[in-house]
Amino acid sequence: MSAAAGTHNLRTVRFDRERLSLDDVVAIARGVARPALSSDLAFRVAIARGADFLDRLLREDGVIYGVTTGYGDSCTVAVPPELMPELPRQLYTYHGCGLGAFLAPEQTRAVMAARLASLCKGYSGVSVGLLEQIVRLFDAGLLPLIPSEGSVGASGDLTPLSYLAAVLCGEREVWRDGAHLPAAQALAEAGIAPLRLRPKEGLAIMNGTAVMTGLACLAWDRAEYLARLATRITALASFALDGNAHHFDATLFAVKPHAGMQDVAAWLRHDLGSTEQVERNGRRLQDRYSIRCAPHVIGVLADALPFFRTQIENELNSANDNPIIDADGERVLHGGHFYGGHIAFAMDGMKNAVANLADLLDRQLALLVDTRYSNGLPPNLSAMQGERAAISHGLKALQISVSAWTAEALKLTMPASVFSRSTECHNQDKVSMGTIAARDCLRVLELTEQVAAALLIAVRQGAWLRCRVDPQRALPPALAVMMAVLEDDIAPVLDDRRLDLDLQRLLERMRDQAWPLYR
């Protein structure tokens, strides 16, 4: 989102001490909403009260971690008063050691929104000016270039968030309209004065869970849509394989009370129409598990998503800083709210459930392309007839790619949280690995979306071929609508052709959530 994109015409998400939703962060990340700091006087007074309390405490020679002391294991080192103003810059400077791919602009906006949300709770001892500076970056379309690697998830996302802190002060680099440029130049051209951080503000920006939480918001949104899409793909696969819709009967599912699984079965009933058992010559009484048990597989994710959402939104709406500044009680509370264990658990669980969708769809494709199991469909779903049929290979290579993507997704399901490492002279001796878990989850989502894109090609081809092989079979209304939509993007595969462009187009549609599914 650039300044030229007309940010003031977007939906506004107000940041104050009230609860934000995961959807608010996703909307900001996608550039369809803009953050605005509340103008409510009581909110602004509450924020200022924390900063004023710290100032008074410093005048009275109070001891505050990260303000009058060094950081981490250096908390026993007293900082001379004349050097205290330099300490915030020292913090973000020495944490400038991130590597790996930069977070995408969408991800960076999610991270910034998550950090702003935490600081707005009023327990971090920051000034209103710092909050306003973050909003200015949004409005100017200036996004810090944040390397994705280098956080162990406690004390928060220190290294990646140091890039936000530095940019607020006119250092390091930013994205602007897709280009990289020095932050000092970008701020000057936007008319934004670099910030000089107050005593605790460097720590307040960096010592929290904003990176893992912002990424988790995006992951949840993609996983929720993917569960619905996997259900629609399963319905098309069932039709293409001449499957048994009675596997999804309402009475059958009423006896196993997992609400998400029951929802998936209901969606399949909606898509396939009648669930009455109809015998046809040569038809199996029971479909193979990747069709028959699809609600049980997809349902695991569907049932887990509300729990994951609660954990992510609780973290989003927390003051996940250290120390916590209780201005009303005039106390400085030293704790560990930067620990990202809840996000780590949610992301480790989510990537497992999502990878199972990849495995499910991979198995469905194996049935569709194999004449032993496809109930009369041609080998590899090749539609070519006549002499050229001998050299036409249909979706043979696509299945190989799907197998590769699925294997990689499954390989990444090892929980990141169990790989805690003791760091920083054993001060951070138990860490969450939440950011690595979130990055892994996003990668598993990406791979599973690629599998889903391939399956859309396959089920579109398979359903079309089923109607050609069995002219008496008609697509149920919901599937007919989906087929018509897919036909706009995917031509039938007749003679062999490259499919990467089709896959990329389908991935774009998927990430835009272009197909309404069971709403």
Image (spheres, rainbow, N blue to C red):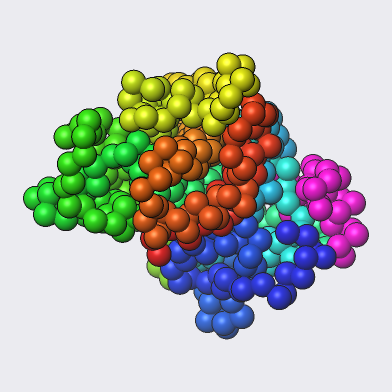
* Residue sitting nearer the eye, 459 or 39: 459
| Residue sticking out furthest to the bottom | 41
Q: Nearer the viewer, residue 174 or 134?
A: 174
The answer to whether residue 197 shows anywhere in this view is: yes
On screen, 42 above or below 226? below
Q: Is residue 388 left or right of residue 376?
A: right
Q: Is residue 41 above or below residue 443?
A: below
**Is residue 41 within the magenta segment?**
no
Q: Is residue 252 above or below residue 131?
A: above
Q: Is residue 176 magenta?
A: yes
Residue visible at 73% across and 43% down in the picture: 145
Image location of residue 431, percent across then percent down: 42, 32
Q: Is 331 positioned to the left or the right of 256 in the image?
A: right
Q: Quadrant of the C terminus?
A: bottom left
In the figure, is residue 302 to the left or right of 70? left
The stretch in magenta equals: 163-191
Can you see residue 262?
no
